[in-house]
Image: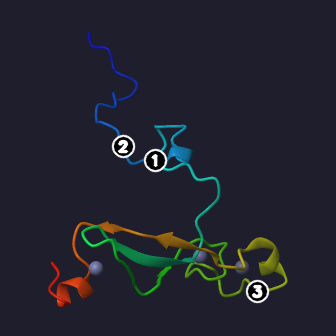
């Protein structure tokens, strides 16, 4: 006779890069306090070797939420005044994104400082 396990044991190690504010529950992948809607992402590469920051073109982060005016899933027949009550009317605050790159920036590379 075998005992059927009701759930699988989580044996995989947990990633260490969880956001401290979101780490209250390790079981849900990303508990979000509010939905992530469309917003701009301001990318600024941080080149570790020379310490320079280089601005990148802004990225438009698109959601596919039906209740977002900017979403591709937003129905065309959802129009004000109803839309203003049910749907997100503004883009969210731009997100600052500073990836750290273990290299010299392109300018330093060009000037031969690498
Ligand atoms: Zn959206
Ligand atoms: Zn709408
Ligand atoms: Zn540099």
Q: Quadrant of ligand 2?
A: bottom right
**Mark 2 burial class by Cα count in 10 Å: few <14, some 14-19, many 20+:** few
Circles 1 and 2: CB atoms closer than 8 Å: no
Element class at badge 1: loop
Q: Which mark is residue 29?
A: 1
> For the view shown, which residue lies furthest in the right direction?
81
- Is 110 on the left-hand or right-hand side of 74? left
**Mark 3 burial class by Cα count in 10 Å: few <14, some 14-19, many 20+:** some
The answer to which of marks 3 and 1 sits earlier in the sequence is: 1
- From the viewer's side, name the closer residue of 85 and 90: 90
> For the view shown, which residue lies furthest in the bottom direction?
110
Q: Quadrant of residue 111?
A: bottom left
**Distance from the alpha carbon under mark 3 to that under mark 1:** 34 Å
Residue sitting at x 77%, y 72%:
86
Q: Up-down: is 90 above or below 57?
A: above
The answer to which of marks 3 and 2 sits earlier in the sequence is: 2
Specify whether tag 1 is near ligand 1 (CB below 8 Å): no
Q: Which mark is residue 89?
A: none
């Amino acid at each position: 006779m075998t005992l059927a396990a009701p759930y699988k044991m989580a044996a995989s190690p947990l990633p260490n890069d969880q956001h401290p504010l979101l780490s209250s529950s390790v079981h849900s992948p990303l508990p979000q306090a509010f939905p992530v809607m469309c917003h701009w992402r301001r990318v600024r590469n941080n080149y570790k070797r020379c310490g320079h920051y280089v601005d990148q073109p802004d990225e438009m982060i698109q959601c596919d939420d039906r209740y977002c005016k900017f979403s591709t899933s937003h129905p065309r027949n959802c129009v004000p005044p109803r839309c203003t009550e049910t749907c997100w009317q503004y883009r969210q605050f731009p997100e600052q994104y500073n990836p750290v790159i273990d290299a010299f920036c392109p300018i330093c590379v060009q000037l031969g400082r690498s």
